[in-house]
Amino acid sequence: MLMTVVEGRRYERLVYEGGELRKRQILSVGAARPIDESSVALPIEIQTYHEGLLQDRVETRWTCRGTTDDMVMSMLAFGAPRRNVRLRADQESPGPLYPSLPSTLSSSGQLADLTFDLRIEEGALAALGGRTELRLTDRSWETLGSGDAARVRIRGKVDARSFLFGIRVRRTELESLEILDPDEGLVRHELRRAGATWSVLGLLPDSGTATPQIDEEGHR
């Protein structure tokens, strides 16, 4: 799974609070381009809607180390409408980051833990040392069905911590569920908090405006 899997794709992100929809965002991903020998930039436009009306539109970019291309898919579900965010991703434990698709050698397994460090590079929060650290742990995968078209479900845990002046100001613990398709890459990423849906990210069809109804079993 490489960064190019998400290039040119559009995703819808729904954010919930108390079981009610609070925010709807459309993430349009541009083409990755190299900045230097060790990093690349991924442009993203984020449109935020409230009660069906466009509330905000932000053009931003994530600057990522060149060796972390295959980790970027997991970040889409956490995408925040801020300008010029620098993303650093590290593999914390041995093992694959994602299963090979289509999966022909096995039907389940464990995946490496990941750490993401997001730093804001301009504005007031940048001056305050604003950053967020995300740890994805206990990641396990299983195939949904059989054959070359079988999708994969990945479960894991998320520990999100926000810092100002180097001091932790907020901590959020979430459950993560991803659905990967052999051809389309990430098609759904749901985050849950205390058993309730916190947000859902879904791949938009090329010519549509509604998220495909893909459940946690990988069905449309």
Image (cartoon, helix red, strand yellow):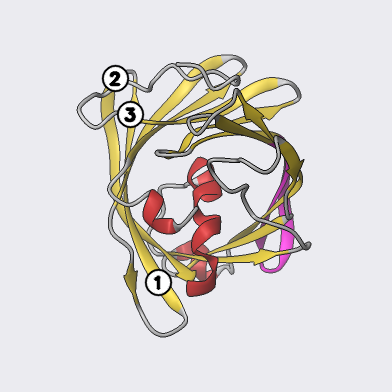
**Magenta segment boundaries in residue numbering:** 155-174
Within 10 angstroms of label 1, few (less than 14), some, or many (20 or more) residues?
A: many
Residue assigned mark 2: 52
Give the x, y percent position of residue 13: 44, 32
Q: CA distance from mark 3 to mark 2?
A: 6 Å
Q: CA distance from mark 3 to mark 1?
A: 29 Å
Based on the displayed image, in which of its 4 quarters is residue 3 positioned?
bottom left
What residue lies at 59% left-to-right and 33% top-to-bottom?
152
Residue 24 is labelled as: none
Residue assigned mark 1: 40
State the residue in front, 88 or 188: 188
Based on the displayed image, in which of its 4 quarters is residue 40 positioned?
bottom left
Residue assigned mark 3: 49
| Residue type highlighted by circle 3 | Tyr
Give the x, y percent position of residue 78: 53, 44
| Residue type highlighted by circle 2 | Gly
Q: Say whether marks 3 and 2 touch (CB < 8 Å).
A: yes
